[in-house]
Amino acid sequence: MIIPKYICRVFLVGIFLVPVQLVKGQQQEVRLADEYFQNAEYEKARVMYQKLSKNHETARQIHKNYLEALKNLQQWDEAEKFLKREIKANPDAVVYKLEQAVLLEKQGKASEGVRVAGKAIEEVRDNPAKVMEAAQFGIENGKPEWAEKVFTEGRRKSGNKTAYAFQLAQLYRLTNNMEKMMDEYLTVAMENRDNLLAVQNALQDDISQPEDFEKLEKVLIMRIQNDPGERVYSDLLLWYYLQQKEFRKAFFQARAVDRRQKLEGQKVIEIGQIAIQNKDYKSAAEIFEYLVREYPQSINYPLNRRFLIQSQEELVKNTFPVNQFEIRSLIADYQRLIAEVGKNAKTADAMRNMGLLFGFYLDQKDTAIVLLEESMKLNRTDQRFIARTKLDLGDIFLLKGEPWEATLLYSQTEKALKDDPLGYDAKLRNAKLSYYKGEFKLAQEHLDILKLATSREIANDAMELSILIQDNTGLDSTEEAMREYAAIDLLLFQHRDDEALRQLDQILVKFPGHSLTDEAWWQKAKIFMRRNENQQAVGELEKILTQYRNDILSDDAHFLMAKLLEEKLGQRERAMEMYRDHLTKYPGSIYVAEARKRFRQLRGDMPN
């Protein structure tokens, strides 16, 4: 018999219509049951979940909530029956078996629960996906020991001693077992040196507490002692010291690596240069003194000599009051270097530095100009050196009181290296020149561009000057106080400290309570420091901390005062207290790491 086509279509629609309607109804029931569960109406939810659990598809959907509802109602028998049924239907589902173990523990059957969990872990140890699934369950359900066991069993089964190392390290971090975490990362690094960068990044992310940093140092030192020829440990310890800005320790470690690998001081040079970049001139001087002494025949000898003198120069310039005899001694060192190596491109930088010493510290500006111009002739092919020296020349002309010559040189560099950090530096100097002259609008136009500069240091300097101008010109339509203060800033640049100090006192009397008051105190403190009048400097800083404790300068004032108490006034206990307070009062401060280090040194936790 032939059945008409339209009857076939009706029959087929009927076949599929019933299941679709059934599924829709079940989904509505699931949503209603979930709503009861969310509202903590567990008995109502249980009744509906129990019905839905009979269907294989909906059982998976309601599994977690149903089980939680039963636990809240302490319906252990029903929960156990449900789990056994689900395990039978899904024999590969390790999570269901681990849930059964949790259920047994909740019923006071701890030993049976341990047995069930152990068996489940054993079953999945050769399946990486299941290992991860089981470990995740352990972590989420407060069973980190299960996660550890499944990872270690998985490692043993795989025969790879670094299997799951990163996962184990993260687990140990979560459980605050820092030594085991470090062991796992070191295992990864040892297995393959290509993993070293990933391990360094992980350690940097996972270690934050000072005591944990100390543990890492001890672990690495112990491993080096046990296996001195293993480069991975030495490289990691060197990296660690650099992260902590412990350049002297980094020097000792690099020196040992240098000797073992016969690198002719190359590793040590890198540490010295990093120390200079971070303004640890004391460590840098020690490093380059070693290099000059140990490698007199090295191709890097002229470079090492220059860096040694540069480090010593920075120490002299930052030890107040600046000693004129030591400045002349530095100049003599540069002259000896030039005599040894000759006047050429290699000594052009030494001549440039010598010129700056004559200009800024011996007040011999014409001599400075001659030396700077001569240094450019010696290194005429290096355009960046030419640009830097032009900026220095501009500074010397500004010292001489010839701002037009200065701005001409700054502008030449700005134009020649428009999108280069040196070009930005030139623009910043032009902005400062406008500021000194009281041309605040023009200065602000330069600074608005520089705030987006690629160099963080230049962008920060631009931001600081921009904020200073904005905060102190908006409320004062005449801008008289700001103009006088900018003129004082120029006096300070020109090292005319006595005159600047008198002007600062006048501005404090003339404009009492002005928003520039804390800035004036800050400048007075720095002048007193340069004159080695440190008690007076502390007095000015205390005014800032007392009356402007929430101002932008309070962070700097607090740390600087602690340093003065420690280094200049011998008040170590009070300094230690201030360093400790700095960590809590100014948690976002750029000085936090240094404050923590100095606090620990004063407390005796680490050597100076």
Image (tube, rainbow, N blue to C red):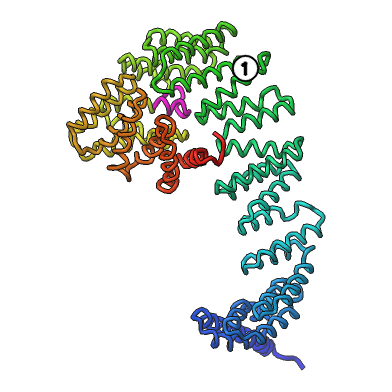
Q: Quadrant of the N terminus?
A: bottom right
Q: Decide if residue 459 is in sight here.
A: no
The reply, left or right, for residue 82 in relation to residue 317 is: right
In depth, the one of 153 and 377 nearer the eye is 153
Q: Amino acid at mark 1?
A: Val
In depth, the one of 590 and 195 nearer the eye is 590
The reply, left or right, for residue 288 in relation to residue 481 is: right
Residue 521 in the image, given as x and y percentages of width and height = 29, 33
Q: Quadrant of residue 526?
A: top left
Residue placed furthest toward the bottom: 1
The reply, left or right, for residue 522 in relation to residue 568 is: left
Residue 408 in the image, given as x and y percentages of width and height = 36, 18
Q: Does 520 lie within the magenta span?
A: no
The number of numbered badges drawn on the structure is: 1
Q: Does 418 lie within the magenta span?
A: yes
Range shown magenta: 414-427
